[in-house]
């Protein structure tokens, strides 16, 4: 049965901060994770009404050889044309929001995680009872990102620069995990927060029942 009032934890952090690693540890504890980036890709899957609308507007050349959306081509178009960017956002944002809220409501775990690198940038914290930031110093963030994505240092720096500053995220987050240690240390911090969230969820559901 769908949980129409799920207790949602927003999980965020800059690129390479360790969000996916933290999510994996939460998932091992039985917590379902909805990935906002994945939802954004799902709504433009081949055959979807949104992809059909994009093809109608930009022609078949917006598709790759497999019939999937050529994201880099679309990015080029919206990068140089603000009205196209607006059109695309008006099309996709409501669809992404509906799909995301549906997936959150379908979750069966005691609470559910919404993982989004741009949680604060896109105002998604309004769907969350609490937010958790995975935080790491810039140097480590760059090294880990370069290693994982085989990027140059400059390319990694450019991506970090386009995201909200670390200090702003720190101000906005309810909880912060510093991921400057080992993966084992991250895992144990995740476990600690997991038990604190279970307690909060219990209190939340007691309060709901009393209403
Ligand atoms: P994000 O999802 O925030 O982009 P990831 O969880 O993918 O970040 O982490 C980025 C890279 O750094 C991955 O290759 C991951 O295995 C590695 N990593 C994350 N946390 C640690 C850690 N504490 N120690 C060593 N490597 C880490």
Image (cartoon, grey):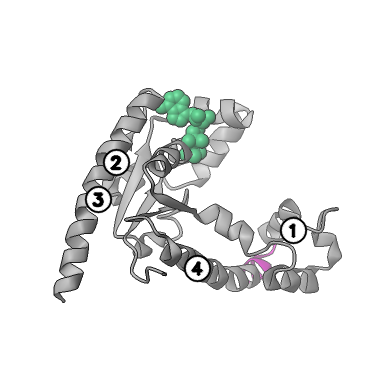
Q: Which numbered disc, 1 or 4, marks the residue that appears first in the sequence?
A: 1
* Beta carbon of the mark 2 residue lies under 8 A of ligand 1: no
Circle 4 crowding by C-alpha within 10 Å: few under 14, some 14–19, many from 20: some
To which residue does mark 1 refer? 69
Q: Which numbered disc, 4 or 3, marks the residue that appears first in the sequence?
A: 4
The single residue placed furthest to the front in the displayed view is 1
Q: Nearer the viewer, residue 103 or 82?
A: 103
Secondary structure beneath disc 3?
helix
The overriding secondary structure of the stretch rendered in magenta is helix
Q: Position of residue 50 (x, y in %)?
A: 68, 70
What residue sits 29% from the left and 34% below the top?
Answer: 189
Could you tell me how far apart the alpha carbons at marks 4 and 3 are, in whole angstroms? 26 Å
Circle 2 crowding by C-alpha within 10 Å: few under 14, some 14–19, many from 20: many
The single residue placed furthest to the left in the displayed view is 210
Of circles 1 and 3, the one toward us is: 3
What residue sits 29% from the left and 44% below the top?
Answer: 194
**Position above or below: 27 against 152:** below
Could you tell me how far apart the alpha carbons at marks 3 and 2 are, in whole angstroms? 17 Å
Circle 1 crowding by C-alpha within 10 Å: few under 14, some 14–19, many from 20: many
Q: Which numbered disc, 2 or 1, marks the residue that appears first in the sequence?
A: 1
Q: Nearer the viewer, residue 78 or 5?
A: 5
Q: Which numbered disc, 1 or 3, marks the residue that appears first in the sequence?
A: 1
To which residue does mark 3 refer? 198
Could you tell me how far apart the alpha carbons at marks 1 and 4 are, in whole angstroms? 20 Å
**Which mark, by number, is residue 176?**
2
Q: Is residue 116 left or right of residue 64?
A: left
Q: Which residues are magenta?
A: 81-86
The image quadrant of residue 8 is bottom left
**Position above or below: 170 against 45:** above
């Amino acid at each position: 049965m769908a949980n129409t009032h799920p207790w949602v934890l927003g999980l965020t952090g800059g690129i390479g901060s360790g969000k996916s690693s933290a999510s994996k540890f939460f998932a091992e504890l039985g917590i379902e994770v909805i990935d906002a980036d994945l939802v954004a890709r799902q709504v433009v899957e081949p055959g979807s009404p949104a992809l059909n609308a994009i093809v109608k507007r930009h022609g078949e050349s917006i598709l790759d050889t497999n019939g999937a959306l050529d994201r880099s081509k679309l990015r080029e178009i919206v990068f140089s044309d603000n009205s196209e960017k607006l059109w695309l956002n008006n099309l996709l944002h409501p669809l992404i929001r509906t799909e995301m809220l549906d997936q959150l409501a379908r979750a069966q775990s005691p609470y559910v995680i919404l993982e989004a690198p741009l949680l604060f940038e896109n105002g998604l914290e309004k769907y969350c009872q609490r937010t958790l930031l995975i935080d790491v110093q810039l140097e480590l963030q760059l090294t880990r990102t370069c290693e994982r994505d085989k990027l140059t240092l400059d390319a990694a720096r450019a991506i970090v620069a386009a995201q909200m500053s670390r200090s702003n995220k720190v101000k906005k987050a309810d909880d912060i995990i510093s991921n400057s240690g080992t993966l084992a240390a991250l895992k144990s911090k995740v476990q600690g927060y997991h038990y604190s969230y279970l307690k909060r969820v219990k209190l939340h559901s007691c309060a709901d029942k009393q209403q």
